[in-house]
Amino acid sequence: MPEHHKAQGVVEAVLPRSLFRVRLADGAAITASLATRARRVTVKVLPGDNVTVEVSPYDPTKGRITERLK
C-alpha cells in the first residue's frame, strides 16, 4: 500500500460537505477533508489555521487533515 505524503499548509476556505481548501507550503492548493480521528475529538478548523495534511498518493489534489497546529 502506498505511503501518504505528509505536508503542512494553511486553510484558505471552508467548502460545503466538510471539505477545506488548503494551501501547502510548496504553493500547491488541495482539497482536504477531516480525518476520522480529528472528527471524533471535534477539532474546529477555520480559515487561517495551520494544519498537517496527508496528501493522497493517487491524486495529489486531494488530502486529509490529520492535525491542527497551534
Image: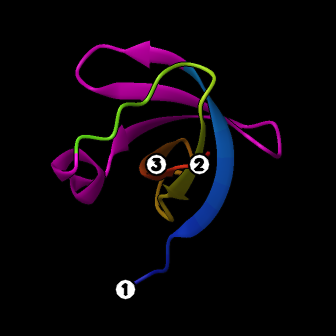
Most foreground residue, 49 or 23:
49
Quadrant, the N terminus? bottom left
- Residue located at (67% from left, 51% from top): 8
Q: Position of residue 3 (x, y in %)?
A: 49, 79
Say if mark 3 contacts mark 2, CB within 8 Å. no
Callout 3 secondary element: strand
Q: Amino acid at mark 2?
A: Leu
| Image disc number at residue 63 | 3
- Is residue 38 on the magenta stretch? yes
Q: Which residues are magenta?
A: 13-41
Q: Amino acid at mark 1?
A: Met
| Disc with the residue nearer the chain's start (3 vs 2) | 3
Residue corresponding to mark 2: 69
Is 49 left, or right, of 66 in this rendering? right
Q: Marks 3 and 2, Cα distance to the nearest angstrom?
A: 16 Å
Q: Position of residue 50 (x, y in %)?
A: 63, 39
Residue 64, compared with residue 27, is above or below; it is below
Say if mark 2 contacts mark 1, CB within 8 Å. no
